[in-house]
Image: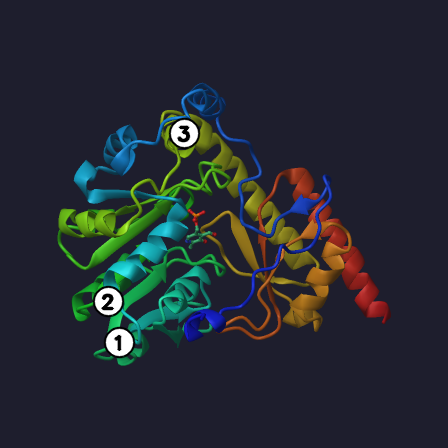
Amino acid sequence: MVNEHIKNLSPKSAGAVKSEKAIRLDKGELPFPPSPRVIKAISEAAATINRYPEILGGCLREALAKYTGAKKEQIVIGNGSDELIELAVKVFVKLGEEVLIPVPTFFVYWHSTQIIGANPVFVNRNPDFGLDVKILLNKISPRTKLIFIANPNNPTGNIVSRETIIEILKNVECAVVVDECYYEICQSTVVDLIEKYQNLIVLRSFSKSFGLAGVRIGYAITNEALADYFYRAAQLFPVNKLALVAAEAALSDLEYVNDNLKKICQEREILSQELEKIGLQVYPSKTNFLFVRTKKLGIPSSELVKALSARQIFVADFGLKPGLDAYYFRTAVGTATENQALLAGLKEAIAEFSIK
Ligand SMILES: Cc1ncc(COP(=O)(O)O)c(C=O)c1O
């Protein structure tokens, strides 16, 4: 009964059991709670959840128009940017068509492509994880309908320049999604280009900088015509009421967001230097995580990640993921205490490997 392309998807697993005291650096989350205004707004809205949320996101769309400088008709609100990635595939791609994905990058791009029976086409990034536009354009075929560019990129943390994105937009006829999930941390955007390039869709998220990963809310910014098609393809009520009020309250407290991000950027530099001191190679990052290479130590990342998880310290293994060899992991930047725990755990694990 089940479609062949669904049978080919990997099963989901719940992951390792985490204790209350676990150090959770594997999902790229903000280590701080949301603004007190968010908690108040959710508590107040909880009494009205017998009613459906507003269609098209209600007041949040207007608040986002103000925040982004776009028109409210150019904004599509979704159940996390994950939902908008899936929606982009549904809007532009059919069974058997192709989606270009520069790798290494965020797995949801190819997962969403495979869900509808389309084909992800991987394009290797340069050794420094930059994008070679020529190589990318060479992979375009008549079946290519969509290109995903995470900017900054997850897991590598680097950014591609505005000029590079413009060069791609100018030279392709298909849709181009620029995923700015980490916008508030890196402050670099191409939102101002959505009118000039009618094939551009920018994605943003409340999960990282605003600390709302648990309520699931993100948005797309594109021209009005495409935004309308996105809404046609979306569910009637994709975003729950508590997420809508949470996001609106979070936007009203940008000072809280900026204070948190300042702390994260400071901690990121300290953690990066300390990781280098213990023999790991750390890539420059414009995000709230660090991408780390374990090759110099000669220890495959899967082994280090396993040794850390035995200590209830969780980071994400990227060994042998598309576009990568066996020596990479990603860690979120946590609080100073969490980062110290990570460093201590790594030192112990590395010492164990040198005894073996
Ligand atoms: C590049 C990128 N895009 C999108 C997402 C998903 O964000 P959301 O929580 O809004 O679905 C992530 C999450 O890690 C990400 O790294």
**Marks 1 and 2, how far apart at CA:** 8 Å
The answer, for residue 109, to whether it is visible in the render is yes
> What residue is drawn where x is 17% and y is 69%?
173
> What residue is drawn where x is 26% and y is 74%?
144
The answer, for residue 179, to whether it is visible in the render is no
Q: Is mark 3 on a helix, strand or loop?
A: helix
Residue of label 1:
137
Q: Which quadrant would the N terminus be assigned to in this image?
A: bottom left
Q: Which label belongs to residue 168?
A: 2
Comparing marks 2 and 3, which lies closer to the viewer?
3
Q: Which amino acid does label 2 sit on?
A: Ile
Q: What residue type is labelled 1?
A: Leu
Q: Which label belongs to residue 250?
A: 3
Q: Residues within 10 Å of mark 3 (few under 14, many from 20)?
A: many
Q: In which quarter of the image is residue 305?
A: bottom right
Compared to residue 176, the image places residue 298 above or below, namely below
Tell me residue 37's x, y (percent): 45, 22
Q: Which of 353 and 198 is in front in this view?
A: 198
Q: Is mark 2 on a helix, strand or loop?
A: helix
Which of disc 2 and disc 1 is earlier in sequence?
1
Tell me residue 153's x, y (percent): 42, 58
Comparing marks 1 and 3, which lies closer to the viewer?
3
Which of disc 3 and disc 2 is earlier in sequence?
2
> What residue is drawn where x is 45% and y is 51%?
286
In this rendering, position of residue 112 left or right of residue 274: left
Which of disc 3 and disc 1 is earlier in sequence?
1
In this rendering, position of residue 349 left or right of residue 327: right
